[in-house]
């Protein structure tokens, strides 16, 4: 084999290996994205995060025990997240009275960006900051928005990937109203 043919063969082999590696990476990433870390029917993992629009720390298992809880993962750079926030705000007062809490977990880099968004949109439900992404990882969230609807006993009733419409959100909140409030 000539020197020129040998160089072409090596070049093609390297390109083929890179392409094969990219395909394997894409397949593995896809499989991992579809894998539920927190499955319906399981206990929701507890977390404790600093509130951006409240005082102190919000502890999922201590502060919200006995309530239905919607945990929504979002960020200000996520357009679908920003579209569903007004729906959450419009339903919040009614469902808070029924024993359901909405907790929005922001994945933004800075609190200032989150505070500005809260102020500009007059949000009153608790918003916490997952600056390290640890809670996002615990819940297996890869894409935003993602929501978990948690029963008063702490089990996950429903997991929703992607944005919610007002009707769907209201129906899912109805599913987690404590029995004593129905």
Image: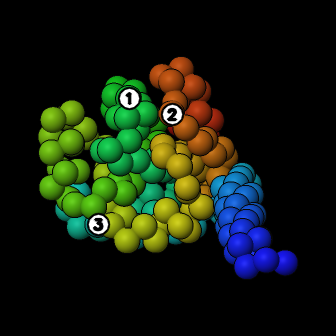
Please indicate, yes or no, whether residue 93 appears anywhere in the rendered image. Answer: no
From the viewer's perspective, tell me whether residue 41 is left or right of residue 133: right
Q: Label 2 vs label 3: CA separation?
A: 24 Å
- Residue 139 lies, in percent from the top left, at 57, 62
Q: Residue at x 15, y 55 (%)?
A: 112
Mark drawn on residue 83: 1
Q: Secondary structure at mark 3?
A: strand
From the viewer's perspective, tell me whether residue 111 is left or right of residue 173: left
In the picture, the quarter occupied by the C terminus is top right
Q: Are marks 3 and 1 in contact (CB under 8 Å)?
A: no
Q: Are marks 1 and 2 in contact (CB under 8 Å)?
A: yes
Residue under label 2, please give it: 163
Q: Residue at x 48, y 22 (%)?
A: 166
Please indicate, yes or no, whether residue 110 appears anywhere in the rendered image. Answer: yes
- Residue 45 lies, in percent from the top left, at 57, 67
- Residue 27 lies, in percent from the top left, at 74, 58
Vertical side of 88 occupied by 39: above or below: below
Q: Residue at x 48, y 43 (%)?
A: 145
Residue under label 3, please give it: 50
Q: Label 1 vs label 2: CA separation?
A: 8 Å
Numbered label tally: 3
In primary-sequence order, the first of circles 3 and 1 is 3
Q: Report which quarter residue 50 is drawn in.
A: bottom left
Q: Secondary structure at mark 1?
A: helix
Mark drawn on residue 139: none
Q: Which one is nearer the viewer's eye here, 6 or 137? A: 6
Q: Label 3 vs label 1: CA separation?
A: 24 Å
In the picture, the quarter occupied by the N terminus is bottom right
Q: Which label lies toward us, 3 or 1?
A: 1
Q: Secondary structure at mark 2?
A: loop
């Amino acid at each position: 084999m000539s020197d020129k043919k040998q160089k072409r063969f090596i070049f093609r082999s390297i390109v083929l290996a890179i392409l094969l590696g990219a395909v394997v990476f894409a397949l593995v990433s896809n499989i991992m994205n579809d894998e539920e870390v927190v499955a319906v029917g399981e206990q929701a993992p507890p977390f404790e995060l600093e509130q951006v629009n409240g005082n102190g720390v919000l502890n999922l298992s201590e502060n919200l025990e006995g309530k239905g809880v919607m945990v929504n993962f979002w960020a200000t750079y996520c357009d679908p997240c920003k579209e569903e926030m007004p729906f959450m705000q419009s339903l919040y007062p009614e469902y808070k009275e029924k024993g359901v809490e909405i907790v929005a977990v922001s994945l933004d880099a800075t609190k200032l960006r989150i505070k500005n968004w809260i102020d500009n949109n007059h949000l009153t439900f608790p918003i916490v900051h997952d600056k390290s992404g640890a809670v996002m990882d615990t819940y297996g969230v890869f894409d935003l928005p993602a929501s978990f609807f948690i029963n008063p006993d702490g089990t996950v009733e429903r997991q929703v990937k992607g944005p919610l419409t007002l009707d769907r959100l209201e129906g899912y909140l109805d599913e987690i109203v404590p029995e004593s409030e129905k």
